[in-house]
Image (spheres, rainbow, N blue to C red):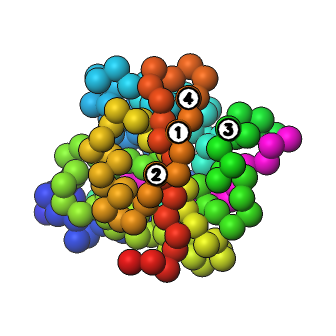
């Protein structure tokens, strides 16, 4: 059976030491290509392997695997530290001790629309609950209304806006309180 024909045989697990950061980076590039084609320079559109490694270094990266292929991912982490990540001062939610941060959410375009994204979001939120976080925060491009609707459907509410340096779009910050439907 071709692993890209079903999502039932997909395993979601933490990124392992033996997983290829190059393959993870390639998955991010593939999944974010359509957003990049719209002129939105999300970091994952063309980030380097080194940046991928840095972003997943916190140990909260989850991957979806099918037939030995990485077909989805989401990155989770605790709050940023203003002394190390001065850029985060623009988003107070990213500094809160009770808030996990979700980023680098990607599903292989060949599997989109089949529920894998929902499974990854469920796993990410479970990761946060298991570590005692009360909220999950994320940001996405303000013009990407379809992404905002997707997150709102899962209970994320817009709590602010931010303009990241070097981005061609403003971002909306969205937060979900865990334990709510």
The residue labelled by disc 1 is 161
Looking at the rendering, the stretch of residues picked out in magenta corresponds to 72-83
| Above or below for 71 versus 24 | below
Residue 149 visible in the current orientation: yes
Where does the image place residue 167, in percent across and percent down from the top left?
A: 51, 23
Say which element carries label 2: strand
Could you tell me which quadrant the N terminus lies in? bottom left
Query: Residue under circle 4?
Result: 163
**Residue 69 in view:** no
Q: Nearer the viewer, residue 67 or 116?
A: 116
Picture disc at residue 78: none
Question: Mark 2 and mark 1: span between their CA atoms?
Answer: 8 Å
Disc with the residue nearer the chain's start (3 vs 2): 3
Q: Which of the marked residues, 2 or 4, is nearer the chain's N terminus?
A: 2
The answer to whether the residues at label 4 and label 1 have Cβ atoms under 8 Å apart is yes
Q: Where is residue 41, by image quadrant?
A: top left
Q: Can you give x and y, in whole percent of width and height, for residue 23 in the image? A: 43, 41
* Residue at image location 53% in from the left, 39% down from the top: 161
Residue 90 circle label: 3
Query: Does 42 sit left or right of 39 as displayed?
Result: right
Label 2: which residue?
158
What's the CA distance linking mark 4 and mark 1? 7 Å
Q: Earlier in the sequence, mark 4 or mark 3?
A: 3
Closer to the camera, 154 or 22?
154
Frontmost residue, 124 versus 145: 145
SS under mark 4 = loop
Q: Give the quarter of the image for residue 10.
A: bottom left
* Residue 139 is a magenta residue: no
């Amino acid at each position: 059976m071709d692993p890209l024909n079903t999502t039932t045989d997909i395993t979601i697990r933490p990124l392992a030491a033996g997983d290829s950061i190059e393959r993870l980076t390639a998955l991010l590039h593939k999944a974010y290509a359509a957003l990049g084609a719209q002129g939105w320079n999300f970091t994952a559109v063309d980030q380097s392997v080194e940046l991928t490694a840095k972003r997943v270094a916190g140990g909260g990266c989850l991957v979806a695997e099918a037939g030995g292929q990485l077909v989805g991912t989401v990155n989770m982490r605790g709050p940023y530290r203003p002394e190390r990540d001065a850029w985060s001062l623009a988003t107070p939610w990213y500094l809160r001790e009770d808030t996990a941060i979700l980023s680098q959410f990607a599903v292989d375009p060949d599997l989109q629309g089949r529920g894998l994204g929902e499974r990854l979001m469920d796993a990410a939120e479970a990761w946060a609950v298991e570590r005692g976080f009360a909220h999950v925060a994320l940001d996405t491009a303000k013009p990407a209304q379809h992404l905002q609707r997707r997150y709102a459907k899962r209970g994320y509410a817009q709590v602010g806006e931010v303009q990241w340096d070097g981005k061609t779009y403003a971002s909306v910050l969205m937060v979900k309180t865990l334990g709510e439907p």
